[in-house]
Structure formats: C-alpha cells, structure tokens
Amino acid sequence: MTLNELNTYISSYLKIQDFPNDTSLNGIQVQNSEPDTKQITKIAFAVDACGDTIRRAHLAQADMLFVHHGLFWGYEQGITGIHYERIRQLILNDTALYACHLPLDAHREIGHNYALARQIGLENLEPFGVWKNTVIGVKGGFTKPKSIDQIINAMFTNGAAPVTVLPFGKKEIKTAGIICGGGAREVEQAIQQKLDVYITGETKHESYHTILENKISLIAGGHYQTEKLGLKLMMEKIQTEKDIPCVFIESPTAL
C-alpha cells in the first residue's frame, strides 16, 4: 500500500474525523517523497516521535513511523532546534510520520483504554471520561471483586510496575474507570460516578488529598506504559490485514 492508501484505511478505521477537538494533528504529519506511488514495505510503531525513535525507525528500514504522540500539537511552531532536526531526519531518510492521539485512546476495539479494560477483566464496558467534550475512556465492573494487587498484576504481565499507587479506597474492588496516559484530572469524574478505582497513566500532587478524602483508589501505571497497548494492537491489525511487516520500537521514559 502507498502512504495515502494507508492514510485512508487508518483514518476510516480509527474514525479520526470524530475527534475535531484533539490538539494533535492526527494523520500524516510528514509525508514521504511519493505518497501516491511509493509502496510502504515496513512500518515502525512507537509511543513518541522523538530523535531516538526516528533514528531507530530508519535503522529498522521502515518507510513509515506510526506514533501516538506526534510532532504537531495545534499551535504554530517554528521549524528550528530539535523540531527542525527531527523533521530533517524524516525527510532525509524518506520516512513518513503518522500520528494518532485521541482516536487511538478511545477506539473500542484496539484503543488503549478498552484494551487495558479487557486485559484486567472488566466487563459490561461503557464509555467514561470526558475531555474537551469528547468521551475517551471506559468503565466497567468485575464479575468477582478484585484486590488492587490483583489488578496491578493483570496490568503488568511483563513484570513492570506502576509509577504511583494510592490505595485509599475499598479493599474489594468491584468497579473501575480507565483513561490511559495523561488523565490525572479526570479522577474527579471517577469520584462523581462512585467508581472504586481509577486507572490512568500519571497523577498530580494537587489530586492527592482529593483522592484520599473521597476514599477512591488510583493506579497510575505510567504515561508511557499505559499507551503501548493500542499501538501494538494496531500493529497486529496492519500486519494481519495488509501483510505489511511491522516493528515496535521501545523508548521508555519511566514516567
């Protein structure tokens, strides 16, 4: 497939047009030299577009880098400094850059939030968590109540650990809400809906006492760690349906 053909396929599947309030420039951020004719023979996937992932995509001989966090965020930015260098390397290597932010968070089949919900065993999934008038998260319940340690073990099957755990709620957890990544402030929506635990990527100092006094538990699994699931599922889908080899580039931040 060409870059433009892939763009049509991905945009339609992830429903990019349904997220006009996203600050990310979703879709093609940097094209290749021949978007209508050059075949994409390999795609690299990564959480962030940065010098490391751009360099390693080229070393992996990928024609395209697909990321969750791209280079353009809804405001004018001069092509200078590291912004220039990142774009320069993409152009010199003829590597296309494709970014997908909120559509990849919210997708009900392969999105980060729904993928994590299924991984930890949540059932009766419903949309949850509004950001800029857009619902991006998910909530649900456990058939059998779980402890916070059981949930954490289900989240991190690779032996990793959450960044922060605030176990201020019930010992037996029946309900959970999830907004992966930077959903710190949305804990208040979980409190309003009387959920037992809120799962996100990171939290903030000013939320601590709100969480404590409302007797809800919070698991901050790490912004980076919670936003890999959807990328890997999208990678598997493209490999299976379009027969394009893919590679996932790990460039963790520990945040």
Image (tube, rainbow, N blue to C red):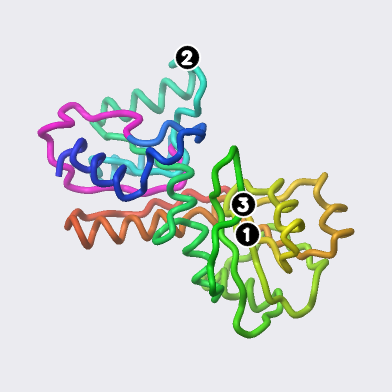
Q: Residue furthest left?
A: 37
Q: Position of residue 218 (x, y in %)?
A: 73, 61
As drawn, is 255 to the left or to the right of 76?
Answer: right
Residue receiving disc 1: 221
Q: Which residues are magenta?
A: 28-50
For the residue labelled by badge 2, is the local secondary structure a helix, a strand or a loop?
loop
Q: Position of residue 195 (x, y in %)?
A: 72, 65
Residue receiving disc 3: 129
Camera-side residue of 59 and 164? 164
**Residue in the image at 63% along x and 74% along y:** 151
The amino acid beneath tag 3 is: Gly
- The Cα atoms of the two marked residues, 2 and 3, are separated by 33 Å
Instruction: Give the answer, above or below, for where 246 lies relative to 54.
Output: below
Q: Is residue 31 magenta?
A: yes
Q: Quadrant of residue 155?
A: bottom right
Instruction: Give the answer, above or below, for where 99 lies relative to 60.
Output: above
**Residue in the image at 27% along x and 54% along y:** 246
Q: Nearer the viewer, mark 3 or mark 1?
A: 3
**Residue in the image at 24% along x and 46% along y:** 9
Camera-side residue of 119 and 250? 119
- The Cα atoms of the two marked residues, 3 and 1, are separated by 17 Å
Q: Position of residue 202 (x, y in %)?
A: 67, 51
